[in-house]
Amino acid sequence: MVLSRINIENACELLDTIDLLKTQLLKYGIEKGLNDPNTIQISEQLDTYIVMYQKKMAQK
């Protein structure tokens, strides 16, 4: 399952999404390999949410 891009305002929600994506990334990476398109897509989504979280924390 790959998450669609959603508008997340709350830092706690961002962390929850990051944790979910990390779990999915591990699962897909083990099952399908690191070069699988789904694994790469999840990795890119995870990167996006990590950057969003870092920017939100820098604003505080």
Image (cartoon, grey):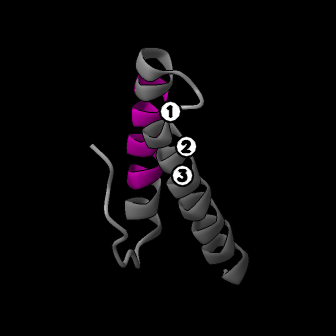
Q: Name the quarter where the C terminus is drawn.
A: bottom right
Q: What is the spatial separation of the Cα atoms under label 1 and label 2, in whole angstroms?
A: 6 Å
* Closer-to-camera residue (51/30): 30
Give the extent of the magenta segment. Answer: 16-27
Q: Which residue bears the numbered disc 2?
A: 40
User: In the displayed image of the protein, which residue is found farthest to the bottom?
Assistant: 59
Q: What is the spatial separation of the Cα atoms under label 1 and label 3, in whole angstroms?
A: 15 Å
Residue 52 on the magenta span:
no
Amino acid type, callout 3: Leu
Q: Name the quarter where the N terminus is drawn.
A: top left
Residue depicted at 48% across the width and 34% down the height:
25
Q: Would you identify the image quadrant in which residue 52 lies?
A: bottom right
Place of residue 30 in the rendered image (x, y in percent of width and height, measured from the top left): 48, 16
Q: Which residue bears the numbered disc 1?
A: 36
Q: Which residue bears the numbered disc 3?
A: 46
Q: Would you identify the image quadrant in which residue 12 lies?
A: bottom left
